[in-house]
Image (cartoon, grey):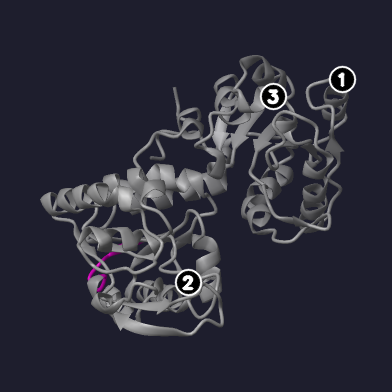
Amino acid sequence: MRDQFKFADRLDVADKTVLLRIDVNVPIVNGLVSNDTRIRHVMPEVRALLDNGAKVVILTHFGRPQGQIVPSLSVRPVAKAISKIIDQPVPVESDVIGKGGRAAVDALRPGDILLMENLRFYKGEEKNDPEFARSLAALGDLYVGDAFSCAHRAHASVDALPRMMPSAVGRSFVAELEALQAALSQPIRPLGVVVGGAKVSSKLALLENLVTKVDKLVLGGGMANTFLLAQGKPIGASLAEPDMIQTAQRILKVAELNDCKILLPKDVVVAVEFKSDATHRIVKIDDVTDFEMILDAGPEAVIDAGSFLENCATIVWNGPMGAFEMPPFDAATNALAKIVAAKTQNNGVMSIAGGGDTMAALANAGVSDQFSYVSTAGGAFLEWLEGKRLPGVEALRKG
């Protein structure tokens, strides 16, 4: 992989204006960043560029303003958070491609940093408009892409811009690529994957790709219900997609043909209401009544999953095993996450997690720092696992 990209840490950036594309689409509460994980994730690249004498111009987006100026989606709270972390002023420039932007960039000295206002305030960003990209390119000498979480978006600052000027990949981008390559492109086998979440339809491409590449697949969450239904199991009033039964049966058949073993829960936690204080019980899958909803995998299912993954050298995790956001229906997710974390810490298993609610689920289980790698990329992580080529990755490959 390393021969396919130029790396920012090998470039001479002294006195150069570096356009650094990062993803700081973080939660804001009362005008303040409430979770700065994504910001801290890219700060090593920011610090390295500043320490090496670069003039850093940060390019990013925030929310979905649809090409309109929306004050509530300004990046100013992000500037305050970055400033606090790096302990230096981080001014924000609103006139990104106008005279104001040009003047702000010209005023930078080596070691200075400037945050451009939300690029999605401009229609050209999401349209991947080459004219908009050229206007951005005129502001800098080099481009560094460190926003892997945006790599699935064919947007101007992600796709068109790096093709127009000398470009390189940043530290967090490299870490994501190496983790994903270890996960699926060149894994140490046996390779096991845990996939949860609500719907088969939202992860159809993912499942179709995985069953042709992995050795073992654990299914949980609402999507497991559809597969159980496809096997003729009773699921009561549980979330499921009856119109996806034939698709589930086809995936099971393809898995069998490719020697991919699939594990579904044998016992489940059910309730007649979806609320935290609902009366619930643990039952065998065949004993779910018509009025009950499956809200989590059962303790036997967790033990089975741990044994099923026992000899795996690589484990990829995407999605929760149940309604983890509402205790006590987080038990299976928490327990299996701790099993995988223990395999990582004690047995040297390579564990990679990411996509959707995965970060929140692992944080809830208290094991985020015990996996080999936890990706901050949502859609990009999923699309990579689906086998898709990502525009933001292709744009940064050496020509």
Is residue 282 highlighted in magenta? no
Badge 1, how many Cα within 10 Å: few under 14, some, many 20+?
few
Real-space Cα distance between discs 3 and 1?
A: 19 Å
Count of numbered marks: 3
Q: Quadrant of residue 64?
A: top right
Which of marks 2 and 3 precedes in the sequence?
3
Which of marks 1 and 2 precedes in the sequence?
1
Q: Quadrant of the C terminus?
A: top left
Q: Residue at x 30, y 49 (%)?
A: 244
Name which residue type carries label 1. Lys
Question: SS at mark 3?
Answer: helix
In this view, the mark in front (3 or 2): 3
Is residue 194 visible in this depiction of the protein?
no
Real-space Cα distance between discs 3 and 2?
A: 41 Å
Question: SS at mark 1?
Answer: helix
The x, y position of residue 345, in whole percent, is: 40, 75
Q: State the residue lying farthest toward the front.
A: 290
What's the magenta bit mostly, secondary-structure-wise? loop
Tell me which segment is drawn in magenta.
Answer: 309-315
Contact flag, marks 3 and 1 (Cβ < 8 Å): no
Query: For mark 1, what is the residue?
Result: 99
Is residue 398 visible in this depiction of the protein?
yes
Quick one: 253 or 350, which is closer to the camera? 253
Quick one: 59 or 270, which is closer to the camera? 270
Quick one: 340 or 182, which is closer to the camera? 340
The x, y position of residue 324, in whole percent, is: 50, 71
Disc number for residue 377: none
Name which residue type carries label 3. Lys
Query: For mark 2, what is the residue?
Result: 370
The x, y position of residue 335, in whole percent, is: 41, 79
Disc number for residue 123: 3
